[in-house]
Structures are given as structure tokens and as C-alpha cells.
Image (tube, rainbow, N blue to C red):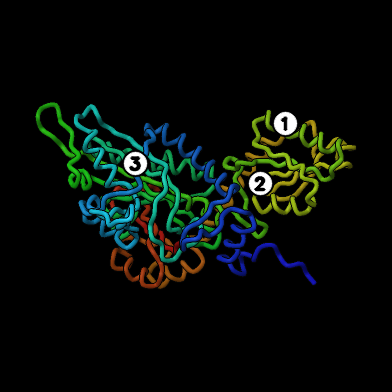
Amino acid sequence: MAKAPVLTPQAEDFPRWYQDLINKAELADNGPVRGTMVIRPYGYGLWERMQQEMDARIKKAGAQNAYFPMFIPQSYLTKEAEHVEGFAPELAVVTHGGGKELDEPVVVRPTSETIINEYFSKWVQSHRDLPLLINQWANVVRWELRPRVFLRTTEFLWQEGHTAHATYEDARAYASRIHTDVYGDFMTNVLGIDVVLGRKTAKERFAGAINTLTLEGMMGDGKALQMGTSHELGQNFAKAFNTTYQLQGAEREHVWQTSWGVSTRMVGGLIMSHGDDNGLRVPPRLAAVQAVVLAIKGEDAVLAKVREIGAQLEAAGVRVVVDDRTDTPFGRRAVDWELKGVPLRIEVGPRDLEAGTAMLVRRIAGGKEPVSVDSLAAVVPGILEEDQAQLLRESRERRESRTVDVKDINEAVEAAATGWGRISWADLGPEGEAKLAEQGVSVRCLVAADGTVPAADDQPGNYALVARAY
């Protein structure tokens, strides 16, 4: 009888494969309250690496980290009508505390535009206070009706940036900078996901924004995942909270604002973009563990050698773990590291020791070959970069091969069954967008004819990318 696979094959049941992988790779568990999740150490290690890479880019863009309360007076949300209407179905509201009813209900933070604007209105007085560039790493709560670990959870982790500027042009340029230089660079060059940078339609914009820029990734099953967004808020929140600055004279002007964020949803995107039937495949630039050195046997000489190799790789700048747990069968350990998607396994046993080699197993490119122990520190960094490039190449090839040009709604729905459709926005328009939504297909973004982000919805030559989405 054939041995049952560790994971449900993707082709058989992609959602079940996703859940299997999260469980078997020890990434997360469901929390005790419906829609919440417990992120396990290996999964949290992925998020920490994402934080580190993102935080460096955010700071390079000039933003500083701060922290604001998670409890927001309900009255704050009602100040911007479109914002509160957009979030009303997802709000968690606290009405009692300390054993008594609260004088005013408080909302558990769904996003922080309102509370941050309350303080921006105090902190911004003069044009000299601008631009004000703030970011926070926090948790948020949105009451999710159809939860899925990492993708849609009632509570999740994220960063949210909030900025105030003197002019519309400055705010618009900064939102675009975050979109491309922070998010686009990170997702392409670290996550290895070939995201499409585009503009949301009016229907899909963030509640309260005048423009939303998005990054859309194609997952392994052809569906789309919104990986992050950057919003131009115009002066909507500034007028609601009277956030103004003084010009050279006595005149005061409302600031122009942006907000932008990415979340633990990116962990789900990582899984669905790069995972295969053997488990996760982690891009080397992201991986908290780029290489694991495994002792096949518990002999003293073998244990000494794997520790020596680990030290050499660490000195070469490789993030490495030495697995010398020889009380656990080697096969089980090898499968566990494969499930977790560590890019390289370096296996050492008595025979390898005699030959002066180690078996190098590549998780991304596949295959294994003996490599001289003395050359490992020199060759491993280059192999990691090769495998990083391969993941991005595979992501791009999948998106390009499964995106087709379509002429009408019927063809768009057919294309969305296995991938994405590309249709002229002039031919589709808001009316066609609404008809697609009735069939579970959405316009993920608008892209200009030359592949860049369009300046306006009705810019001539815009096309819409349509897909089924997570």
C-alpha cells in the first residue's frame, strides 16, 4: 500500500493543503475565540523577519515609529462618515469595563486614522511641523465572518503608517513612495512574489480615501491576494478633526494625509505563492533559518563536524541552525525541515566525514549533491541567491501564463476560474464591475496601458485585472 502523503496535494484540494501546511509546519493554531489565531514560534519568526525588512525601509522613507491606544472612543469614528460606514460591520465595541457600563462605548482598534488624527490636530501647528511621518506596529480587530488563518482573522498584526503633508502633491508623492520603494521593493526582492502595482477602483477604495494604491499577488491556485495598500486620504480626516497648519501669514490650511499598511496576511501570501506538495518554501532573503546542518548519527566526530560547519556558515553571514538532536530519527527531522521550507539542508554522517564532504539538499531548486566541507562557506551564499531568484521567476511565470486578455464579462468570469483576466476599463466600467461582483469576481486593480500605476480611474488605456480573491 502506498504511503499517504504528509500534506493533501494542492491539485486535490488547495484550501485543505493550506490548512495542512500551517498545522504540519507548526506555523499557527486556531485561537480559542472564533477567528483568532495563535502564531507559533516558527510562524512568528517569519513575521519578525518581515517586520525587520519592512521597518528598515519605512525608516529609510523618513517615518518614525510610535504607538497609539487600541481603545478608541466611538465618537471618533463617527466624525468621518464614509470611514465609519465602511468599518461598521467589522467593529468590536466595548460597552462595559470595571464592572459597570461605560459612559461612552469604545471601539477596539480596527485601524487608527481617527485616533491618530486627534493627536495630529494637536501636534501640527505650523508648516514647520510638516511633513509629519508616523508608523506603528500593532494589532487590530475586525470581526471576521469567514476566518482563515493568516488571511482573514478577527485579530491580526500589522504596521500602519499615517502622515500629514502641506500639499496634495507632497502627500500623493509620499503614498506612491511607500507603494513602490517600501512595499513593492520588499515584496518583489525579499518575499520573491511578483506583485502587480495598481490603483483600486472607486468601489474598492479604502473607506475615507480619495485614492488607494494596491499590490496584488497571484497565489498558487490562480486567485488574487491583496498584499498591501497605500492610501491618499486627501483632506477628509483633516477636516473632520480640524488638523490644520499656519501658513506664512495668519491663514490656516488643512493638511493632506496618507495612510498605508501591510499585515500578517503576507505570511499567508508567502505560503500560497511558494509552497508545494512537500511544504513551505521560504525565500532565502526572508528566511530566519537559511540553512540547517543535520547530524545523521550521534557519533562524537559527526556532532563536532556539524557544529564546526554551523560556525563557519554563521561567520560567512548565513542564518544557520545546527540540528544535533540524534535522539529523534533523522528521517523525521529531515521531513520537518522540508515542511518548514528551510532553503538548504546540509547533512553529515560518518561516510560524509570520511570523504570530507556534506550532502547539500536544496529545498527550492530541488536535488542533492555532495559538496566539500571546506567549500561550503564559500558556495552557500551564492546558492541562496540563485534560489531567491528562482522563486521570483516562478512567481512571474505563473502570473504571466495565467493572465489572459478578455473582451467581455463572460470571458472575464471564465478566466477567473483558473487565473486572472485583463480587460479594458473603458469597456468594463463600474456597471460591469458590479456584474462581475455578482459572480464572485472582483476588479483587483487598474493598471495603465504601459503597465504603470494610472494617475486616474478614467485615464485612457487603463485596463482592469479581474480575479477571484482571498
Q: Is any atom of residue 333 visible in this view?
A: yes
Which residue is at 44% across, 63% downward?
Answer: 467
Check disc 1 and report its element: helix, strand or loop: helix
Q: Nearer the viewer, mark 2 or mark 1?
A: 1
Whichever of labels 2 and 3 marks the residue nearer the N terminus, that label is 3
Q: Nearer the viewer, residue 310 or 155?
A: 155
Tag shown at residue 311: 1
Check disc 2 and report its element: helix, strand or loop: loop
Whichever of labels 2 and 1 marks the residue nearer the N terminus, that label is 1
Tag shown at residue 30: none
Which residue carries the number 2 mark? 342
Q: Residue furthest front?
A: 99
Rendered location of residue 98, percent (x, y): 33, 52
Check disc 3 and report its element: helix, strand or loop: loop
Rendered location of residue 444, percent (x, y): 39, 58
Cα distance in 3D space between marks 2 and 1? 18 Å
Q: Nearer the viewer, residue 448 or 362?
A: 362
Which residue carries the number 3 mark? 68
Cα distance in 3D space between marks 3 and 1? 42 Å
Q: Amino acid at mark 3?
A: Phe
Q: Amino acid at mark 2?
A: Val
Q: Is any atom of residue 461 visible in this view?
A: no
